[in-house]
Image: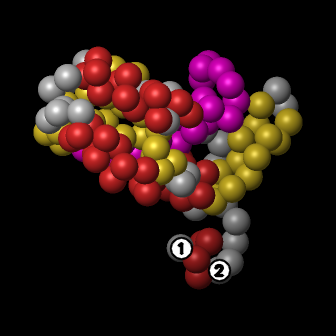
Amino acid sequence: MLARDRKMAVIVSSHLLSEMEMMCDRIGIIQGGKLVDVQLVKDFVGTSEKIYALEVNKKEHGLEIIREKFPQSQAVINHLHIEGTFSKEEIPAIVRMLVEADINIYSIKEISKTLEDRFLEVTGREEQ
């Protein structure tokens, strides 16, 4: 209410990033006593490339195909899925390639990055 109605800034310092993600509209990252970045939470967490999990029947073969055509995807097998970083526009091409290779696709899910995931990417280390 203070920020919205009275145009006041409220600064909260916390290591509980999941709570910060729900409560704040902007995030500032301080590392080593220096301000590293300030962004809107939605911009900081959201990127044009998302992580997708593809449930397929021939994971190893599917992974080979994806890595060959999309080496930047950093695709890996994670339990029942192939997971990789793709743009939304790349998904139809991946589906076509897998189907043409006789690989059954059971599901494709977008995995959202959390504020904590992005924090670790920006700071390059695990939270202490």
Location of residue 1 with respect to 63 vertically, above or below:
below
Quarter of image, res 128: top right
Residue at position x 40%, y 45% from top?
Answer: 112
* Name of the residue lying farthest toward the bottom: 5
Residue 24 visible at all: no
Residue where numbered disc 2 is placed:
6
The amino acid beneath tag 1 is Met
Task: From the viewer's perspective, tell me whether residue 42 is left or right of residue 92.
Answer: right
Task: From the viewer's perspective, tell me whether residue 36 is left or right of residue 78.
Answer: right
Q: Position of residue 80 (x, y in %)?
A: 21, 23
Quarter of image, res 3: bottom right
Location of residue 15 with respect to 124 vertically, above or below:
below
Residue 1, numbered label: 1
Residue 8 visible at all: yes
Determine whether the residue tagged by mark 2 lies in a helix, strand or loop: loop
**Which badge, 1 or 2, is on the more N-terminal residue?**
1
The amino acid beneath tag 2 is Arg
Q: Nearer the viewer, residue 68 or 56?
A: 68
Task: From the viewer's perspective, tell me whether residue 96 is left or right of residue 41.
Answer: left
Determine whether the residue tagged by mark 1 lies in a helix, strand or loop: loop
Distance, label 1 to label 2, CA atoms, is: 7 Å
The stretch of residues the image draws in magenta is 108-128
Residue at position x 33%, y 20% from top?
Answer: 77
Q: Position of residue 102 (x, y in %)?
A: 17, 33
